[in-house]
Amino acid sequence: MSRDAVRDGIATYFGGPFDPTTRTYRPGPLLLYGLATVRAYVPKVAPDTDYSVGLPAGRAMGAYAVVHLGDTIERRVAIGGPTSGWKHRLYGVTLHVYHLAQTALAEDAQADLDLLLEQVSARIHADRTLGGVVLQAGESTAGIRTTIGTPSYDKGSEHIRTYASVSFDADVYLEA
């Protein structure tokens, strides 16, 4: 399976159907937890609507994510002769999560992001194939790694921006 197909499958699994007009995946299964948009690639500029499209009015918090395929390790598993066999590809996947809250209390924004990140991990555990895209995800010895940055505050406003990431390995086997 190609990098593009893996990236598209992961974006679909977390973000929902692809919209070719906006080049986004939405509405997705984590909309209830504030994940409004998923992108397969990093855009030059992400509009503020990526944080909130489809969310209930008055929610005041939302997020979008970008799929990143970092390191890829490939090795051939020779079975049955000099040219036949399988290739094992291990993709290092990171979901970069950008969270925006417009609340008076920073604690509310951080709690909202915590809940979203827990749901991202729960979604990986719910189907280790990520909807049939990969053989398994999050099952390596590295597990599922979540990192949360320090919230930043827009001076003179109630905007609270926080970056987080969820990283895991995804295994694919291809006929060699």
Image (spheres, helix red, strand yellow):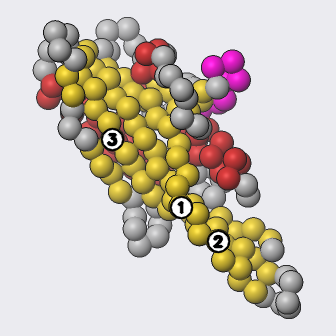
Horizontal side, residue 120 vs residue 134: left or right: left
- Residue under numbered circle 3: 164
Q: Secondary structure at mark 2?
A: strand
Asked which quadrant contains residue 77, the reply is bottom right
Q: Quadrant of the C terminus?
A: bottom right
Q: CA distance from mark 3 to mark 2?
A: 28 Å
Magenta span: 15-22
Majority secondary structure of magenta residues: loop
Tell me the amino acid under the disc marked 1: Asp
Membership of 23 in magenta stretch: no
Alpha-carbon neighbours of circle 1 within 10 Å: few (<14), some, or many (≥20)? few
Q: Residue under circle 2?
A: 74
Residue 117 coordinates in the image, percent (x, y)? 34, 42
Q: Is residue 34 left or right of residue 13?
A: left
Q: Position of residue 139 (x, y in %)?
A: 47, 67
* Amino acid type indicated by mark 3: Ala
Residue 55's place in the image compared with 29, above or below, is: above
**Image point (20%, 38%), residue name:** 150
Q: Is residue 17 above or below residue 103?
A: below
Quarter of the image for residue 159 reads: top left
Q: CA distance from mark 3 to mark 1?
A: 19 Å
Q: Nearer the viewer, residue 112 or 93?
A: 93
In the rendered picture of this protein, how many numbered marks are placed on residues? 3
Task: Give the residue number, with chain letter if any, for mark 1.
Answer: 71
